[in-house]
């Protein structure tokens, strides 16, 4: 078994154990509706986690993903609903801005963490301008898509699987995805081989923007309305999701399927407590504890391997 | 890949030709008027001591450096020295394998082929890449046991080296015409190294060319058709392998100039104290002794010194009586605080020694810096100028002052004279000698022979271990070279 | 860099020296925002605006000082647990005091103790799990926040009366909380500029390996910095809760970005190794005054946030232009 397998095994195991515990405590959760309820809100989190993963893949970090998703949600709930053409144009522009930010960060050698801190204020401000008070409405098709009830398997599971598989194909299997991972792995080697790091970083950031937009849209589809602070917690959750999913902070080691599993685990950890009849006060704490636990186990595993 | 089919172009046709190529980095002439033609079908063994200019020559050949003088031309594309040498080299099938690994550790073996092969067709690229990389691995290292889907980071160092070599030899959009191998066998075991040598021979027979750098003279004699010797940035010998003997080759690498002045004075008998340093690898030093660490760069000397220093200091406690002080050679990595003034850089190590109640005694700090500025003749307008505004030599003096100003009984020096002018060197040698007279012990790793000749005792490193201990009269360049290079036959 | 020690001959600070200080821009910007607000109001309420600015800037300044020490340690060092530590310390301290005036001093000690605990936990994660500080403080912040929610349980404990009076009161023109924050800033300045420990922190931020090879006890210093940051967060939470009439679970939220922003706008290098304390206060004043200015111009929260963000990005782009090429 290679380390790559271990990398994906850990998130699978953590999700499986947590899910088993939930089923044990509340057998009724083991149903179509139960699963849908458990994982419904995981879809936007998973998309945001994938967005964060794109950035971490090229050795940066994005502190603005939460406000960006909020902004996209606000645009979806207002502009896309009222004037679709303008709405989609704004979302497209937002993706391009993200790509631009990536290019500027590389060209000027800026610290991504502070630049995205600054842009997080900008997205937050734009969100308030677009939607000053909570409200708006979800576009019809989006709502019916997110709330659709396909036979046998709940929408949440289908969507999560789809996100995981598609991004896996894009990042792990495709020709360009491999090069993008290479940026995180050995930037100098790519430079020497003649690749343009600026273009690659812009691409990675652009992909992050794309998945941020999708996260915002999915969120509106579920909640049917938006507000400017709707997804602030996604910044921290998405970082935690990437790490839980076997990603590492440096070296371009990320796993899309792991990231989706990480997002599912974090969402499940929140609902787990209510099944445990513990006060929901511990929701966030449970997420933190799982993160620390997984990191500790990972350390033990890698250390044993090193010996 | 089929190398049995002859590579286009006749045997003996030039792949790369350097014509009076020179390379200067500021005042340093790393390559002086080098003439070299690499032809199809030959394997050139490139040898020379540290700093002889091997890596500069190689980087000019592969186009990474554009020479500051002279011309480089690649096969049929007769190109003058231009900014696009890199592209010419790429188009002519010039590939390099360096000691610093250029693989992406987070990718698999087959995915790593994608990085250098930029124009790889998209459709079914995995299959193509797998086929190419496995063909290359099978050809160079039969029975290698490496899977195309293994992540490079999970491989052993030897396996990574094998993958990198195989990728260099692999056929991509263009065939490999010239492969430059810089110490390719350093992490390979003997049997696998033998496979590589075998492949080089086949590759050359089929019309490819190889430039082979190694400290294992046995390998050079085994595989090279021609040997090029470098010394002080110049190509001093360029003859078919038959024209050399091992002894002759070692002599050819030695310096032309003699070092008599260092002689009797340097090795005058002195009364040395007890053993104060004892390293697990056998290196030891007595009080007041100057102990040299020699050998080719990168054979474990720097690691031994850093480990020793870190074992003598704590990451949790500070002390007014440090056991050792460290003088960095790789200044940017190990020595310099880039944002700080000369003054602050100089006092960092000694702050706890002269300060009260945790506050910096700025009067004493100033005095210390003034004293050492005069003592070691640092050329600076003001001690509050940024350290980086000084020349390299003067920066190095500051780092010396920092260490010597402390009360530490042992001073560890990690090749501290890299890029320092002769005048400065002489001054520092004198200072080290007088400090040693006063009972200080020096551990001195140097890549420059005349510095090692200053030492009382010398340990020569090879492959991370001590290959010889030289004392007094035996400290000669010849002995050091002999111990640095593996003299045995390449293992069968 | 202009923060090299002055030698004996140049103790007097000339105007040129002043302009070269990296922190001067934060004060100029704060003054400009103040002036612009006054233009609209025609000079009305200058005193009360100044008073309010000092009060609210005080909280940002204290957490900012802690964050500054952390950021000084170099790339990757950020304390994301500051908001959670603030909330936890405030909640536990107020609960402990239970509005009882005789427990004020022990209550403060509880807040400080919670800070020490948070800092220890953070550093233990960094050291034992060998994870980047940003991940360590992120995961621990989840735990701290949860602890705070659990211990709070929606009950809002009122602060002891004398303490509420103290935090909302002032001496002459200076709010008491500002006096505390100024005192903390002065101590921080002495530590950073005059103490050996300050040199150590700065050296680690520039070149960790070189610091270690120069005998700097790197683990001890990093340990101290993370504990200091958490303790300052605890003190801020304590003051803020007493100031606003009770602990509130969201009280720390805005201080995560705020603490980093005041460090960056104050002219400290985000890459570490080059920080200054005065800039923190200037930036904290600026962050408050820009809001008042935009409010007085009738601009909403949206524009305010956008401008804040653009200022941060501009400052970073400008700061790195001057280069850390080395």
Image (cartoon, rainbow, N blue to C red):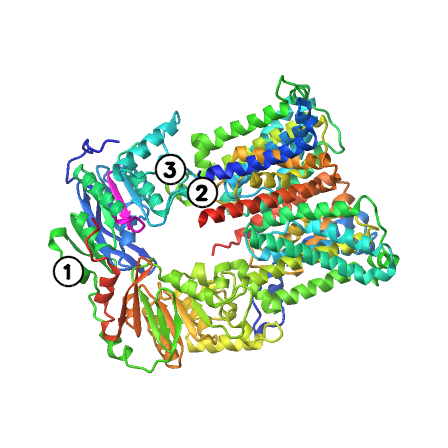
Q: Distance between the residues labelled 1 and 2?
A: 44 Å
Q: Is residue A71 magenta?
A: no
Secondary structure at badge 3 equals helix
Q: Quadrant of residue B290?
A: bottom left
> Which residue has dot 2 on it?
A185
Q: Mark 3 lies on which chain?
A: B
Q: Give the residues drawn in magenta, as a range.
A: B176-190
Q: Which chain carries label 2?
A: A
> Which residue has dot 3 on it?
B109
Secondary structure at badge 2 equals helix
**How busy is the neighbourhood of tag 3: few (under 14 within 10 Å), some, or many (20 plus)?**
many
- Mark 1 vs mark 2: tell me if same chain: no
Q: Is residue B364 left or right of residue C247?
A: left
> Which residue has dot 1 on it?
B248
Badge nearest the viewer, 3 or 1: 3
Instruction: Kindly identify the residue that appears in the image at 15 percent across and 38 percent down.
Output: B11
Compare residues B145 and C243 and report the one nearer the observer. B145
**How busy is the neighbourhood of tag 2: few (under 14 within 10 Å), some, or many (20 plus)?**
many
């Amino acid at each position: 078994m290679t380390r790559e397998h271990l990398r994906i095994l850990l998130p699978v195991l953590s999700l499986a154990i947590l899910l088993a515990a939930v089923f044990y405590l509340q057998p009724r959760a083991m149903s179509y509706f139960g699963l849908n309820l458990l994982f419904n809100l995981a879809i936007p989190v998973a998309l945001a986690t994938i967005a964060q993963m794109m950035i971490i893949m090229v050795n940066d970090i994005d502190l603005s993903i939460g406000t960006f998703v909020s902004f996209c949600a606000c645009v979806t709930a207002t502009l896309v609903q009222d004037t679709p053409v303008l709405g989609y144009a704004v979302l497209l522009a937002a993706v391009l801005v993200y790509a631009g930010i990536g290019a500027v960060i590389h060209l000027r050698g800026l610290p991504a963490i502070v630049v995205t801190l600054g842009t997080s204020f900008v997205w937050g401000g734009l969100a308030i301008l677009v939607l000053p008070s909570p409200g708006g409405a979800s576009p019809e098709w989006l709502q019916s898509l997110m709330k659709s009830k396909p036979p046998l398997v709940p929408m949440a599971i289908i969507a999560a699987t789809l996100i995981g598989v598609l991004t896996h194909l894009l990042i792990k299997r495709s020709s360009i995805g491999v090069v993008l991972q290479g940026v995180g792995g050995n930037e100098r080697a790519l430079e020497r081989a003649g690749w343009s790091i600026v273009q690659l970083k812009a691409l990675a950031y652009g992909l992050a923007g794309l998945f941020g937009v999708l996260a915002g849209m999915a969120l509106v589809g579920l909640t049917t309305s938006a507000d400017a602070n709707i997804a602030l917690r996604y910044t921290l959750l998405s970082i935690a999701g990437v790490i839980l999913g076997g990603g590492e902070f440096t070296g371009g080691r990320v796993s899309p399927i792991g990231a989706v599993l990480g997002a599912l685990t974090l969402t499940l950890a929140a609902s787990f407590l209510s099944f445990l009849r513990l006060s929901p006060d511990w929701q966030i704490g449970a997420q933190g504890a799982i993160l620390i636990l997984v990191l500790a186990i990972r350390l033990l595993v890698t250390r044993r391997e090193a010996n | 890949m089929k190398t049995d089919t002859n590579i286009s172009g006749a045997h003996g046709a030039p792949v790369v030709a350097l014509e009076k190529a020179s390379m200067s980095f500021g005042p340093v002439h790393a390559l002086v008027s080098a003439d070299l033609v690499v032809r199809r079908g030959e394997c050139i063994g490139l040898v020379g001591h540290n700093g002889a200019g091997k890596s500069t020559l190689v980087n000019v050949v592969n186009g990474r450096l554009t020479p500051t003088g002279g011309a480089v031309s690649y096969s049929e594309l007769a190109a003058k020295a231009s900014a696009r040498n890199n592209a010419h080299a790429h188009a002519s099938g010039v590939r390099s394998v360096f000691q610093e690994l250029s693989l992406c550790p987070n990718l698999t073996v087959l995915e790593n082929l994608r990085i250098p092969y930029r124009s790889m067709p998209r459709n079914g690229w995995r299959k193509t890449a797998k086929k190419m990389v496995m063909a290359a691995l099978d050809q160079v290292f039969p029975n290698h046991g490496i899977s195309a889907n293994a992540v490079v980071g999970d491989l052993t160092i030897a396996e990574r080296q094998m993958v990198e070599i195989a990728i260099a030899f692999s056929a991509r959009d263009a065939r490999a015409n010239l492969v430059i191998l810089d110490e390719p066998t350093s992490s390979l075991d003997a049997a696998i190294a033998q496979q590589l040598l075998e492949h080089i021979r086949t590759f050359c027979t089929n019309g490819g060319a190889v430039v082979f750098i190694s400290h294992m003279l046995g390998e050079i004699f085994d595989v090279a058709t021609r040997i090029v010797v470098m010394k002080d940035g110049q190509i001093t010998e360029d003859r078919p392998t038959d024209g050399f003997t091992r002894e002759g080759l070692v002599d050819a690498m030695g310096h032309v100039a003699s070092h008599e002045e260092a002689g009797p004075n340097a090795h005058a008998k002195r009364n040395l104290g007890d053993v104060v340093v004892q390293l697990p690898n056998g290196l030891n030093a007595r009080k007041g002794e100057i102990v040299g660490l020699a050998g080719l760069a990168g054979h474990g000397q720097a690691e031994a010194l850093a480990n020793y220093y870190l074992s003598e200091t704590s990451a949790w406690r500070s002390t007014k009586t440090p056991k050792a002080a460290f003088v960095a050679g790789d200044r940017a990595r190990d020595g310099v605080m880039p944002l700080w003034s000369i003054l602050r850089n100089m006092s960092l190590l000694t702050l706890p020694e002269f300060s009260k109640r945790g506050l910096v005694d700025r009067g004493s700090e100033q005095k210390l810096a003034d004293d050492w500025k005069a003592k070691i003749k640092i050329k600076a307008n003001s001690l509050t100028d940024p350290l980086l505004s000084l020349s390299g030599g003067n920066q190095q003096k500051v780092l010396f002052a920092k260490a010597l100003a402390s009360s530490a009984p042992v001073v560890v020096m990690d090749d501290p004279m890299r890029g320092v002018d002769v005048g400065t060197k002489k001054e520092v040698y004198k200072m080290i000698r007088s400090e040693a007279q006063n009972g200080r012990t020096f551990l001195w790793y140097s890549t420059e022979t005349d510095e090692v000749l200053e030492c009382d005792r010398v340990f020569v490193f090879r492959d991370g271990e001590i290959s010889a201990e030289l004392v007094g009269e035996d400290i000669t360049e010849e002995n050091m070279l002999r111990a640095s290079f593996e003299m045995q036959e390449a293992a069968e | 860099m202009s923060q090299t020690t002055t030698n004996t001959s140049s103790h007097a600070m000339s105007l040129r020296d002043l302009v070269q200080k990296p922190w001067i821009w934060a004060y100029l910007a704060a003054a400009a925002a103040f002036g612009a607000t006054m233009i609209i109001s025609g000079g009305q309420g200058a005193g009360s605006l100044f008073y309010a600015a000092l009060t609210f800037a005080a909280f940002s300044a204290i957490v900012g000082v802690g964050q500054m020490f952390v950021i000084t340690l170099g790339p990757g060092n950020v304390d994301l647990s500051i908001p959670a530590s603030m909330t936890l310390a405030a909640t536990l301290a107020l609960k402990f005091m239970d509005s009882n005036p005789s427990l004020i001093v022990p209550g403060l000690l509880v807040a400080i103790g919670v800070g020490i605990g948070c800092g220890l936990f953070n550093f233990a994660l960094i050291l034992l799990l060998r994870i980047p500080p940003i991940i360590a403080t992120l995961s621990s912040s989840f735990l701290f926040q949860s602890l705070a929610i659990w211990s709070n349980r929606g009950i809002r404990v009122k602060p002891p009366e004398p303490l509420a009076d103290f935090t909302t009161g002032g001496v002459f023109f200076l709010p008491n909380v500002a006096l505390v924050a100024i005192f903390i800033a002065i101590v921080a300045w002495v530590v950073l500029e005059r103490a050996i420990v300050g040199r150590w922190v700065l050296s680690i931020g520039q070149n960790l390996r070189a610091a270690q090879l120069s005998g700097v006890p790197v683990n001890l210093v990093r340990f101290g910095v993370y504990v200091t940051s958490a303790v300052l967060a605890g003190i801020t939470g304590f003051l803020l809760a007493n100031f606003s009439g009770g602990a509130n679970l969201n009280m720390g939220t805005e201080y995560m970005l705020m603490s980093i922003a005041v460090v960056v706008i104050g002219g400290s290098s985000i890459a570490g190794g080059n920080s200054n304390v005065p800039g923190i206060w200037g930036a904290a004043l600026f962050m408050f005054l820009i809001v008042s200015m935009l409010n007085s111009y009738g601009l909403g929260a949206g524009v305010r946030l956008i401008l804040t963000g653009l200022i941060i990005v501009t400052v970073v782009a400008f700061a790195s232009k001057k280069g850390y090429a080395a």
